[in-house]
Amino acid sequence: MPDTAMLQRLRDTLGEAGVLTDPERLAPYLVDHRDLVRGKAPAVLRPSSVAQVQAIMRLAAEYRVGIVPQAGNTSYCAGATPDASGGQFVLSLERLDKVREVDPLDAAISVDSGVILQRAQEAAAAAGLYLPLSLGSEGSCRIGGVIGTNAGGLSVLRYGMTRDLVLGLEVVLADGTLVSDMKKLRKNNTGYDIRQNFIGAEGTLGVVTGAVLKLIPVPLRRATAWVELAAGAPLPEMLALVRRESSDLVSSFEFITARSLALVAGADGRLKSGSGGVILVELSSSSQHLPIEELLEGVMGEVVEAGWAEDVIIAQTEAQRADMWRIRETIPEGEKHFGGSVKHDISVPLGRTVDFLAAGGAAVAAYDPALELSVYGHVGDGNLHYNVLVPPGEDRLAFTDRIGRELAPALYDIAIGMGGTFSAEHGVGRLKRGLLQHYADPGRYRVLRGIKGLFDPHGVMNPGAMVDPAEGLIAD
Ligand code: MLT
Ligand code: ZN
């Protein structure tokens, strides 16, 4: 349990507004986004400056108390929820919310890590540029969490994951040291790339307090098609054709099965599923001179000719395009409304997506043919959200636990056997820590532990997430 003296020193440093202890105000910080894990904390710390984050970490190091950094609290893997001991503090980034600078000539934006993603997108747009990170949770997730989880989303195929977009980073280490590397450089060969360690580290190595992100010209023109797939359509070949024939202007290539589509309330009846599901494909361009609509029509003609589509609808208006995207983006909400799902965020090499769908389907049918799947996702990145719907009447938590023990290992074995992974874009957090230990190459796992021990020798940074602190400790 944290010392009362520590709590008093935190109050002296952060002021009353910076230390929440009222149980009602604490509650939302103590449960994960999917309501799977509930923790306890003596207080939620809300620093309003980088210096205050440093002061918190110095105290945490002195008292050997765990700090759980939390940004928008939208982790899918309980990466930002304290444990049930009541001995770990939550460090909320929400008051670090300044957009520091948008630089049009360097095409970069510098932000505090508590800035909500959508606000960063708007600040970039106000400067005539575009932040190519597009996530379902963009209205509430914060940059610190996006970086901590190396978030992916809907346009990774064209612009990469978060780690590809981070030019500079500012981090407070476990002992309070500030590592300030907020450079906007595209080239900088001056030693080890320390920055990449913190991206995707889920706050287990330090607290990210600021970042410089890459911007691009605004994709003013978009051409979007809803492809009703024929049964057995070869998605990898289709992706390759669409990329090649569009001169690689594909920004999204999303897969939706009929069952996922049916979960979306008010889906436009004209936007149906084919026998093989749906591909939502979008080309985008910043140029007024490039006829991408014609390009898409030509490419879709080839897809139909190849026999891969039963029908293709090309969005004729912005409203129709928005409707296609609304359907795709509200599938997670549809699952929740149905009663929940057990999520498997797998990815396999691009050429194996159809193989995974077949093998995964067989594994589920062998386990229990009555189970229903909601499968959709970023098939253009080899990433499928392979979700098992909670059967009506079943207890969600008990079902999640059972599937996690009895079915998920078979699905993950299939993905990993194909050269894939058990976590494509949702992270490891507390939920998948055991999977990381089980599936990681032993040499790689040793390095992970070594990195953890190096940056966090006393195990105070987000203990319980990703790598077990006890395993990563370097002896005092
Ligand atoms: C998505 O792609 O919609 C999310 O990453 C998946 C989810 O919410 O389950
Ligand atoms: Zn996703």
Image (cartoon, helix red, strand yellow):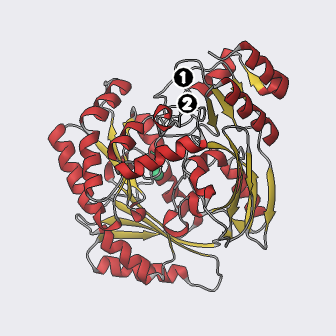
Is residue 328 in view from this perspective? yes
Give the farthest residue toward the front.
Answer: 476
- Name the quadrant containing residue 358: bottom left
Q: Which mark is residue 39?
A: 1
For label 1, the SS is loop
Q: Residue at x 50, y 34 (%)?
A: 469
The amino acid type of the residue labelled 1 equals Gly
**Quadrant for the C terminus in the image:** top right
Q: Label 2 neighbourhood size at 10 Å, few (<14), some (14-19), many (20+)? A: many
Q: Residue at x 53, y 64 (%)?
A: 160
Is residue 385 in view from this perspective? no
Q: Position of residue 132 (x, y in %)?
A: 61, 63
For label 2, the SS is loop
Q: Are marks 1 and 2 in contact (CB under 8 Å)?
A: yes
Give the farthest residue toward the top.
Answer: 4
Q: Which residue is mark 2?
A: 81
- Between 427 and 445, the residue placed more toward the observer is 445
Q: Position of residue 297 (x, y in %)?
A: 44, 80
The amino acid type of the residue labelled 2 equals Thr
State how far apart marks 1 and 2 are (Cα). 6 Å
- Name the quadrant containing residue 256: bottom left
Compared to residue 175, the image places residue 99 above or below, namely below
- Between 407 and 13, the residue placed more toward the observer is 13
**Quadrant for the N terminus in the image:** top right
Compared to residue 342, the image places residue 165 above or below, namely below
